[in-house]
Image (cartoon, grey):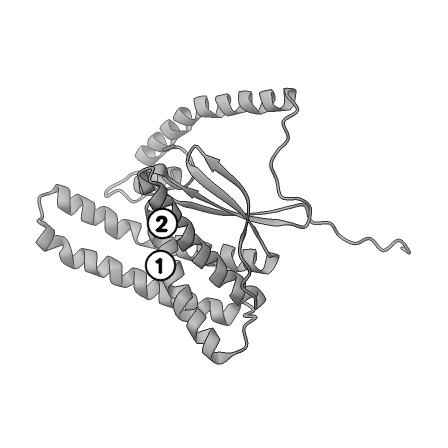
């Protein structure tokens, strides 16, 4: 939906980055978004009440469990089983890299559930892997947002009549900036996060693979994919002697 998640954020970013935007105009446009959101919000409230009336519980990770989810827009795979299978294999590679880096092992990723409105897959992850994934995706999203302004200018230039040949330099700059940003993100992750793999050769292999994986995450975010991490209730041990 155009009023949820990244679509909503992108719409607000577009408003705030328009040329010659004034505070009053920006306020009016954002107020309109708020008005547009009111009906969907009311509908969702009605759905929540209905769920409670029917005793339909929330689908949440169990205490101590961590779940990662990916939403795949149907438009990105054209409702093709082959394309969906290929995407699942790519996602398995991404999650396997993260899990090995964070835990030192590379088990098959367990699927908790799959939804089919837009294809969404919910996966069990080790807490360390989920933390690594959350930080990595957050960095990639920040990088992607930094490039939105350049892409907006490119879109305006195209609308103004510049040819594909004339715009090729802008496209090249965007691609190079994304590649550079992914490289920097991987280097930062290897410095900041606890890497459970000690063998230098394997670390280098995973570093190369992670670059490819995060480039894939960036490309998927651009196509409307959504990545999320949820944590079940954290139960703290209670010292009964106190």
Residue drawn where x is 26% and y is 42% of the image: 18
Question: Looking at the picture, does residue 70 appear above or below residue 146?
Answer: above
Question: Looking at the picture, does residue 171 appear above or below residue 210?
Answer: above
- Quarter of the image holding residue 172? bottom left
Residue 93 position, x and y percent, is: 44, 58
The reply, left or right, for residue 74 in relation to residue 199 is: left
Residue drawn where x is 24% and y is 42% of the image: 20
Question: Looking at the picture, does residue 142 appear above or below residue 55?
Answer: below
Q: Residue furthest front?
A: 82
The label on residue 159 is none
Residue 151 position, x and y percent, is: 24, 49
- Look at mark 2 in the image and give the residue it sits on: 220
Residue drawn where x is 9% and y is 48% of the image: 162
User: Tag 1, which secondary structure?
Assistant: helix
Residue 120 position, x and y percent, is: 46, 40
- Look at mark 1 in the image and give the residue it sits on: 215
From where the camera sits, is residue 1 visible? yes
Q: Nearer the viewer, residue 132 or 95?
A: 95
């Amino acid at each position: 939906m155009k009023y949820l998640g990244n679509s909503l954020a992108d719409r607000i970013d577009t408003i705030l980055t328009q040329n010659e935007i004034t505070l009053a105009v920006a306020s009016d446009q954002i107020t309109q978004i708020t008005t547009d959101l009111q009906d969907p919000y009311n509908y969702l409230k009605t759905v929540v009440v209905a769920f409670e009336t029917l005793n339909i519980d929330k689908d949440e990770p169990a205490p101590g469990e961590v779940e990662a989810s990916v939403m795949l827009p149907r438009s990105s795979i054209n409702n093709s089983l082959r394309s969906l299978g290929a995407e699942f294999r790519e996602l398995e590679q991404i999650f396997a890299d993260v899990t090995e880096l964070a835990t030192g092992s590379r088990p098959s990723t367990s699927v908790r559930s799959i939804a089919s409105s837009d294809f969404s897959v919910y996966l069990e992850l080790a807490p360390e892997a989920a933390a690594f994934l959350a930080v990595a995706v957050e960095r990639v999203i920040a990088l992607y947002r930094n490039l939105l302004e350049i892409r907006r200018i490119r879109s305006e230039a195209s609308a103004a009549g510049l040819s594909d040949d004339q715009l090729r330099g802008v496209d090249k700059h965007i691609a190079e900036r994304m590649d550079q940003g992914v490289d920097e993100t991987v280097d930062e992750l290897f410095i900041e996060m606890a890497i459970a793999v000690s063998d230098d050769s394997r670390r280098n292999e995973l570093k190369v693979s992670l670059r490819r994986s995060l480039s894939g995450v960036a490309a998927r975010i651009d196509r409307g994919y959504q990545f999320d991490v949820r944590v079940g209730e954290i139960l703290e041990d209670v010292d009964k002697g106190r």
